[in-house]
Amino acid sequence: MSAVEPVVTADSSLPTRPCLHCGRPVPQRASAGRPFQYCRDNDDACLKAARNARQRERHAPGLPGQLAQTWELVDRLEQATALLAGSINGELSAAGVESKIAAVRAEAAAQSASAAAEARDAQAAAESARAETQTAIAAAERESARREEAEQEARNAQAAAAQALDEAAQAAAREAEAVQRAAQAQQEARESAAEARRAEQEARDAESARDAALGRAVAAQNEAEQARDQAMREAAARERAEAASRQASAERSEALVVAERARAAADMQRERAEAEAARASSADERAAGIAKELQAAQAAMAEATLQAQQANAARDTAVAQLTSAQDEVGRLRAQLDAERARADELTARVLDLSAKLTQVPTQPTAAAQAEPEK
């Protein structure tokens, strides 16, 4: 049995290999992998001692120097292989890659679901805002129609008030004319009364002179009777003038009442028009607010759509990264296999050189003398 062949100890089922420095058996792992070449229970003392010996012998001429350089190269390859294997087993192992894939898929699905939910919410908000906007527009149209109707009623009331004022002015003019006629009739009545008084005086004068001028007295009496008839007619005319004045006063009072009613109706219509205008302005403001909310909802829906597109792009990027990671894992595994094969080849060459070195009579003696000194 050679020095590098695995040995199964009697008290353990694990295979062993002799330490390349001290020759003690080193237990090996049961699974496949790089074998342990130095003792593992002395804080890598054998490994450090062998490395120090190779450092001293690397510049030696001949086969010992080449052997030391080869062992140093083997150590470096083993370190690189260990780092590469640790990286692959830790981060790029099948379980790690699968967990990363699952995490990326879960995150992409969550982002897609969130973006879809936000898009649905934004669309629902947009539909609601659109319905509210249509309702507000209809209300604004109704308010505008009512405002136009109120303005028309106000214009009609103003026209009626103007007509009532015209009628009141006409009634006042008629009243003034009636008053003037009454004053004229009173003047005529006063003149008639004066004439009657003069006639009575003349009658009295005629009675005193009755004996002297009977014919004149009879004529004067006739004139007096005519004057009384005229006075009676004047009195009747005065009564008619007073009745016309009272009728004109009643018509003026009625016209004033009609004018006051028309003015009150115009004020009421104006107040209604102002209230309708205020309600229409409030409806316009609500419609503007709802339009702003609709624009905000449309912006939110566009943002949610953009987020959904970004989530889909992130998912595609994650899938591409996953594919690239799988390719990188395959490449690293192939590289690891190549490095392992190269390390095995170099180990075989080192073992061959060691075997050749043991066949040289002087060099093993020097190596044996150097090891006890360490």
Image (tube, rainbow, N blue to C red):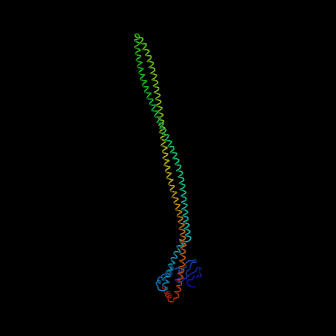
| Of 29 and 204, the residue lying toward us | 204
| Of 319 and 2, the residue lying toward us | 319
User: Residue 341 appears in which quarter of the rendering?
Assistant: bottom right
Count of labels in the image: 0
| Of 158 and 72, the residue lying toward us | 158
Against 229, residue 75 (above or below) is below
Which quarter shows the N terminus?
bottom right
Position of residue 89 measured from the top left corner of the image (x, y, whole percent)? 54, 73
Position of residue 129 measured from the top left corner of the image (x, y, whole percent)? 53, 52
Against 297, residue 188 (above or below) is above
Position of residue 4 measured from the top left corner of the image (x, y, whole percent)? 55, 83
In this rendering, position of residue 30 left or right of residue 235:
right
Residue ranking furthest to the bottom = 361
Position of residue 38 measured from the top left corner of the image (x, y, whole percent)? 53, 81
| Of 208 and 226, the residue lying toward us | 226
Against 367, residue 294 (above or below) is above
